Image (spheres, rainbow, N blue to C red):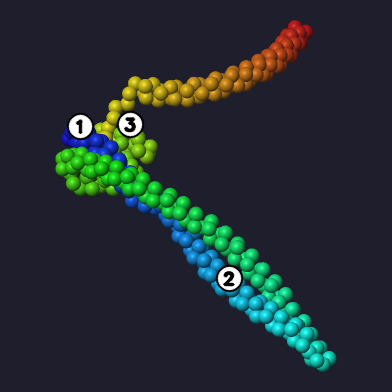
């Protein structure tokens, strides 16, 4: 006979295991909570590095354009001095042409320089923003990490306390049953349930009658054939019994109403049938009376003939 103590130990162990498994799951998933923050920080840092490389490249391009512009300006000034010192018309035209070309180059260089300087300013602003964002994300990540470490420490402490309670109960149980029981709780968070009116309260499936009787007898530990939970018999309380009775009564009343309706229909049909039968019988009676009258007339005529 499975004692009440065994079932009580299983119920107590169930509460402990459910809490322990939940806390262990939190400890396992806790680092994943930082993944989003770490990924966001890594993305910002990567973008910062790319922008910094573009900034350095643009800075070098600006310096190169400034040097080229300065060279062009120097050439133009020299050509302008040469015009003042030119003695022939041909030299004057040659220098004037070179000055025109250098001025075009100056304009082009200035345009490119302005464009690059604008890009450089934009990159500088974005780099400053990214630097601030990186500092903020690092601060948030460190705060979250410290908070998470504190939570994990609390979880670990509670888990150790639960393991101590578990170790006091587990040795009292059959190890094979304990192994199955732990696996059931990991899947369903409920490893032992009651059987009421032949129904498993875990999966709410109706159990075979013989099997339900075996659970009631309690000779051995029984597992639900549908959900694999350990089963124990539980008497149905008066409230549950009344509810069950009311449901049945409601169904019976519904049936009675249907039956009354059928009776009314049958009664009406029967009345009509009887009425028709009465009419038929009256017709038959009339016919019989007519036949009798005809027979009497025949008899009278016969008697009259005999007398003559």
**Front one among 39 and 8:** 39
The residue drawn where x is 35% and y is 38% is 202
Number of other residues with Cα within 10 Å of mark 2, as a class: few under 14, some 14 to 19, many 20 or more? some
Dot 3 corresponds to which residue?
196
Quadrant in the picture for residue 123: bottom right
The quarter in which the C terminus is drawn is: top right
Nearest to viewer (mark 3 / mark 1): 1
The residue drawn where x is 71% and y is 80% is 77
Which SS class for mark 1? helix
Mark earlier in primary sequence (3, 1): 1
Dot 1 corresponds to which residue?
4
**Front one among 265 and 140:** 140
Quadrant in the picture for residue 93: bottom right
Query: In the image, residue 267 lies at what x, y percent?
Result: 59, 18
Which SS class for mark 2? helix
Nearest to viewer (mark 3 / mark 2): 2
- Residue 306 visible to the viewer: no
Q: Single out the residue that lies furthest toward the right.
A: 89
The quarter in which the N terminus is drawn is: top left
Label number found at residue 58? 2
| Label pair 3/2, CB-CB below 8 angstroms | no
Nearest to viewer (mark 1 / mark 2): 2
**Front one among 162 and 35:** 35
Number of other residues with Cα within 10 Å of mark 3, as a class: few under 14, some 14 to 19, many 20 or more? many
Query: In the image, residue 284 lies at what x, y percent?
Result: 68, 17
Number of other residues with Cα within 10 Å of mark 1, as a class: few under 14, some 14 to 19, many 20 or more? few
| Label pair 3/1, CB-CB below 8 angstroms | no
Q: Single out the residue that lies furthest toward the left.
A: 172
């Amino acid at each position: 006979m499975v004692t009440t103590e065994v079932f009580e130990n299983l119920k107590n162990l169930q509460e402990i295991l459910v809490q322990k498994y939940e806390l262990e799951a939190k400890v396992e998933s806790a680092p994943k909570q930082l993944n989003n923050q770490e990924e966001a920080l890594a993305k910002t840092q990567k973008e910062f590095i790319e922008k910094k490389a573009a900034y350095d490249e643009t800075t070098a391009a600006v310096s190169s354009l400034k040097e080229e512009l300065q060279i062009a300006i120097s050439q133009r000034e020299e050509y302008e001095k040469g015009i003042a010192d030119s003695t022939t018309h041909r030299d004057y035209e040659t220098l004037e042409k070179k000055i025109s070309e250098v001025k075009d180059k100056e304009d082009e260089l200035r345009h490119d320089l302005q464009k690059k300087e604008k890009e450089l300013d934009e990159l500088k602003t974005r780099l400053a923003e990214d630097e601030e964002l990186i500092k903020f994300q690092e601060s948030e990540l460190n705060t979250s990490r410290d908070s998470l470490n504190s939570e994990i420490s609390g979880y670990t402490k509670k888990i150790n306390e639960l393991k101590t309670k578990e170790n006091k109960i587990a040795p009292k149980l059959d190890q094979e049953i304990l192994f199955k029981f732990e696996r059931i709780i990991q899947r369903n968070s409920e490893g032992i349930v009651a059987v009421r009116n032949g129904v498993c309260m875990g999966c709410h499936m109706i159990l075979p009658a013989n099997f339900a009787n075996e659970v009631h007898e309690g000779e051995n530990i029984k597992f639900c054939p549908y959900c694999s939970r350990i089963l124990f018999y539980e008497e149905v309380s008066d409230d549950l019994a009344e509810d069950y009775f009311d449901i049945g009564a409601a169904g019976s009343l519904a049936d009675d109403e249907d039956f009354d309706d059928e009776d009314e229909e049958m009664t009406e049909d029967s009345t009509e049938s009887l009425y028709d039968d009465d009419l038929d019988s009256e017709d038959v009676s009339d016919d019989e009376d007519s036949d009798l009258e005809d027979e009497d007339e025949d008899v009278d005529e016969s008697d009259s003939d005999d007398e003559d």
